[in-house]
Image (spheres, rainbow, N blue to C red):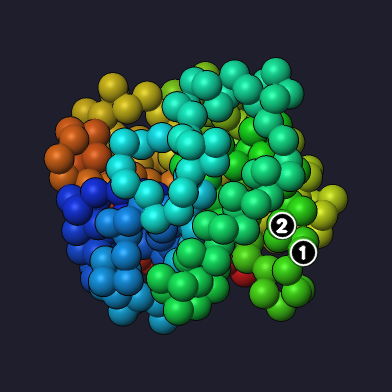
């Protein structure tokens, strides 16, 4: 099982929580938002200190998060989440433009980290939207075979989730896009994960200590990904951080990606 923390570089409290979990051996992957100016070489240096035991990847951001950007935004600004989703389902996202954005963020990662990303995924799972997923698969396939990162898909076994008595409706919705993403990646011969878990309504954050071990039990393949969002300032992020920190058996189950 791969335990992947998202959103490194978004805020200082998130970075701090992720670094503490890395030092405790509770994570095996972290996704970084290098699009933001604050996610600079200095901020990344603490994370890179753990790279011998950690997959470090690119967390693509295609939406406006209210932070200064390290790259000029396309068309003068990035869309909000709802606008991006609406454009995607209406077929108004153009893969050629997304390809250029992915390429620019990939090169930004290399410049800031001094190395290539181990994996690529997307903030708000936007890398799986129509138009975006095609561009991402094409971009990874354009890289030399030995340099290709693995790409996350959010295909989930709803049956396994329901057997664990976990919330399943949001998982089923996100899993639809994950299933299509997985098919596109397999067709392009791009490495991807087998299994995904960690989705719930953040308003139900008080239930997370009970959810966490059940999420882990949903993942039977070594390449299954458990996505987490630790932090300190928001209740739901702090609950995830504390639950991961206190989950005694977690370290024994960690893997890094196996092709």
The disc at residue 95 is none
In the image, residue 1 lies at what x, y percent?
Answer: 50, 58
Q: Label 2, secondary structure: give it.
A: helix
User: Which residue is situated farthest in the front direction here?
Assistant: 76
Q: Residue at x 68, y 68 (%)?
A: 148
- Residue 80 at x, y = what percent? 45, 27
Q: Which disc is residue 139 wearing? A: 2
What residue did someone put label 1 on? 142
88 vs 16: above or below? above
Closer to us: 59 or 159? 59
Is 192 displayed left or right of 117 in the figure?
right
Foreground of the two, 247 or 234: 234
Query: Residue at point 31% right, 36% down?
Result: 66
Disc 2 and disc 1 in contact, CB within 8 angstroms: yes
Position of the C terminus, as image quadrant, is bottom right
Residue drawn at x 46%, y 35% as measured from the top left? 77
Q: Is residue 222 visible?
A: no
Task: Locate residue 241 relative to residue 131 in the image: left or right.
Answer: left
Residue 94 screen position, x and y as percent:
72, 35
Residue 46 point in image, percent of width and height: 26, 73
**Residue placed at 55% from the left, 27% from the top?**
84
Query: Does 105 appear above or below 130?
Result: below
Quarter of the rendering containing residue 114: bottom left
């Amino acid at each position: 099982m791969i335990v992947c923390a998202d959103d490194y570089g978004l805020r200082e409290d998130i970075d701090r929580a992720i670094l503490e979990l890395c030092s405790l051996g509770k994570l095996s992957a972290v996704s970084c938002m290098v699009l933001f100016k604050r996610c600079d070489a200095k901020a990344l240096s603490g994370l890179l200190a753990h790279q011998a035991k950690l997959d470090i990847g690119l967390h693509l951001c295609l939406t406006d998060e209210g932070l200064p950007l390290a790259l000029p935004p396309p068309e003068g600004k990035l869309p909000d989440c709802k606008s991006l989703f609406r454009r995607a389902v209406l077929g108004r996202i153009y893969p050629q433009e997304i390809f250029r954005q992915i390429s620019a963020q990939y090169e930004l990662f290399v410049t800031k980290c001094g190395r290539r990303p181990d994996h690529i995924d997307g903030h708000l799972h936007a890398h799986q939207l129509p138009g975006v997923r095609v561009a991402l698969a094409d971009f990874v396939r354009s890289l030399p075979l030995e340099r290709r990162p693995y790409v996350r898909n959010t295909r989930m076994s709803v049956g396994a989730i329901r057997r664990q008595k976990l919330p399943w409706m949001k998982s089923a919705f996100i899993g639809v896009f994950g299933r299509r993403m997985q098919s596109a990646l397999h067709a392009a011969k791009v490495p991807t994960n087998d299994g995904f878990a960690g989705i719930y309504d953040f308003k139900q954050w008080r239930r997370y200590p009970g959810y966490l071990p059940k999420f882990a039990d949903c993942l039977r393949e070594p390449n299954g990904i458990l996505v987490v969002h630790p932090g300190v300032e928001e209740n739901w992020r702090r609950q995830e951080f504390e639950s991961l920190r206190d989950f005694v058996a977690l370290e024994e189950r960690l893997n890094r990606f196996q092709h």
